Amino acid sequence: MKRMKQRLAVGIAVSLSACAAFNGKPLLLPAVGPAPLETPAAKGQGFLVVYSGWVYDANFFNRPTDYILISADGKMDRPIRNQSESFDQRPALVALPAGRYQVIARSETYGRIKVPVLIKESRTTFVYLDIITQPRVAGSDTNKLVRLPDGSIVGWAAGAGDK
């Protein structure tokens, strides 16, 4: 409950400052890829998890905002309902063929953001656009990150997870 109240308070403050930015041209970031030490997923596909900004409704039901997923060739342009289950606050785990995509999602601090992502077979790419969820990073790995202008981590740079 404390976490929900914290997200609600932060969401209200951030939404007031981000309203104008959300309707304008999205901020474009460098490509995000799988984390270096991420555990392999199922064979034959990769996965995407986007921790987008939060939606706060009248019933105080909070969940990550939906986003748009676009394939590199532009043939796929689909909205993603960013919720694991009906009453779950976790973002959706989206299975995708390996390749490059673009995510257009809402950040809690910068409004709409366009994030290129790299999906690799048997790997999961995470994109962090909310203000609470952040990956664990070892000191030597900080130069392998994609960050927002305020320094918040968005994810691992595409190719940083390659060994």
Image (spheres, rainbow, N blue to C red):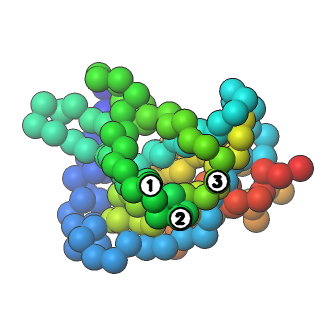
| Amino acid tagged 3 | Gly
Residue, far front: 75
Q: Secondary structure at mark 2?
A: loop
Query: In the rendered structure, are the residues bearing label 1 and label 3 in contact, judged by CB atoms less than 8 Å apart?
Result: no
Q: Residue at x 27, y 35 (%)?
A: 62
Quadrant of the rendered structure where residue 147 is? bottom right
Residue, far bottom: 25
Q: Secondary structure at mark 3?
A: strand
The residue identified by callout 2 is: 73
Q: Is residue 42 visible?
A: yes
Query: In which quadrant of the rendered image does the N terminus lie?
Result: top left
Between tags 2 and 3, which lies in front?
Answer: 2
Quadrant of the rendered structure where residue 158 is? bottom right
Classed neighbour count for the residue bearing mark 3: other residues with Cα under 10 Å, few (<14), some (14–19), many (≥20): some
The residue identified by callout 1 is: 76
Determine the CA span between mark 2 and mark 1. 8 Å
Q: Is residue 151 visible?
A: no
Query: In the rendered structure, are the residues bearing label 2 and label 1 in contact, judged by CB atoms less than 8 Å apart?
Result: yes
Determine the CA span between mark 2 and mark 3. 10 Å
The residue identified by callout 3 is: 99
User: Looking at the rendered structure, which numbered label has been put on residue 94?
Assistant: none
Q: Depth check: 84 or 45 in front?
A: 45
Query: In the rendered structure, are the residues bearing label 2 and label 3 in contact, judged by CB atoms less than 8 Å apart?
Result: no
In the figure, 64 relative to 68: above or below?
above
